[in-house]
Amino acid sequence: MAQLIGKGFVPRLAGHRMHIGRGLLARLFAITVLPVLGVGLFVALLLGVQRVHTLRAIDDSLASTVARILATTLDVSELPQVVTQLQAAVSAENVAFVDVRPVEGGLRFFRSKTPETDWALRAAYDDAVQNALADHRFVFRDNRPQLYRQAAAQIDDPAVKARLQDVAAHLSEEEQAYQVVRANVYENRLGQRVLRLSEESGSVTNMVLPGTLLFELGVGVNNAEIEALLSRQQGLVIGACTLAALLAAGLAWRATGRIVRPIVQLTRAADRLSLGELGEAVSLEAPAQTVTELSELAQAIERLRTSLTLAMSRLRPQPATPPSAAIRPERREP
C-alpha cells in the first residue's frame, strides 16, 4: 500500500503533520486565553478612568468648599484681615493658592504656600485664566521649579544663584497640576453674600445678577497624597486582576492542551494509516482516556487499523505448495 502513495505526497503530509498541532493550539488560544486577558485589560482601563474622575470630583469639591467659606467671611477692605484669612486658607494641606480680585481696580491678593514664588505662580495662573475664560473649572500646571532653574543658570552672582537653586529644590521636582475653581462673590439687597461660578455668571447675556459684584475668587487645590493613595489602590487592584487573569489563562491553556494533544496524536495515527504503517497500535495516554469522545475515536481508529491489517494480509499472495507436499493417490492393497 505504501508503494501506491505518490512521491510528492509524503513530504506534504509530513509538513502538514508538523503544523496541525500549532494551528489548533493557536485557534484554541484565541478562543480561551485571549478573552480572559482582554477582560483584565478592560478592568485596568476602567479603573484608570474611574481614578481620574474620582480625583477631579475630590478636587472640585474641596475647591468649592474653600471658595464658599472665603466668600462668606472675606472682607477685601481690611488688608490685615485679608492677609490673615488667605494665609489660613493656604495652610490647609490640599489648598495650593487663593486669588482674590476686587472690582473697580482694587488691590489684588494672591497667596500660596511659598509666598516668595508667588510672582511666578501668579503669572502662570493668569495665563491659564486667559486660556480658559469661559470655564469656571480648569487645570493648569505649575512650572516654577523650571523657571527658577532657568533663572539660576543665567545669573553669575554666586549668592543669588545659590538662592534660586535653593528655592527650586524646595519646590516639587515634578510639575504639579492644580484643579482651579473660579467664582464671583455678590452682595444682594439684604446684605447677604451670594457665590456664583464664573461660568454661570457669563453664560447668559441678560442674566439678572444676584446683587453687587464684590470680588472674583479663584482657589487652586492639589491632592497629591490622595492621588498617591488612589494610585496604590489601583495598582493593587490591577495586580490582583492581572494575577487572576494569568491564573485563568494558565488553567485555560492547560485544559486546551489536554484536548489538543490527544487530537494531534490521533491525527498522526491516521496519517500513519494513510501511509500504510499498520504495525503500531492506536491508543491514548491515561489523561486523554477520560474524555469519552476521544477514547471512542481512538477505538474506532484502532478497529480501522485492525481491519486494514486483515485486509492486507488476505491480499498478499500465498506461497506455492512444494511438489513433495502434493497429494498422492491412495494405494489399494491386493
Image: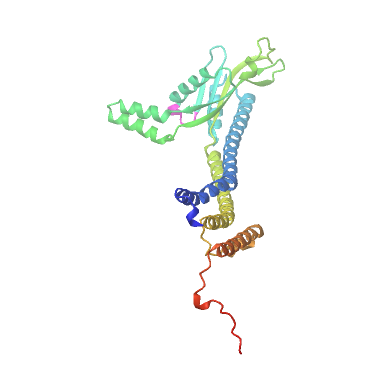
Question: In the rendered structure, does residue 114 fall within the stretch colored magenta?
Answer: yes
* Residue 84 image position (x, y, % from top left): 54, 28
> Is residue 201 shown above or below 115?
above
Residue 203 falls within the magenta-colored stretch: no
Which residue is at the front of the view, 146 or 24? 24
The residue sitting at 52% across, 20% down in the picture is 129
Residue 170 appears in the picture as rendered: yes
Where is residue 330, by image quadrant?
A: bottom right
Q: Which quadrant of the figure contains the C terminus?
A: bottom right
Left or right: residue 308 versus residue 115 is: right
Q: Quadrant of residue 287?
A: bottom right
Nearer to us in this view, 82 or 20: 20
Residue drawn at the location 54% of the way across and 22% of the way down: 79
Q: Is residue 32 above or below residue 206?
A: below
**Magenta residues?**
112-117
Left or right: 163 as drawn, with respect to 264: left
Q: Position of residue 278 (x, y in %)?
A: 53, 62
Residue at the (48%, 19%) spot, across then down:
127
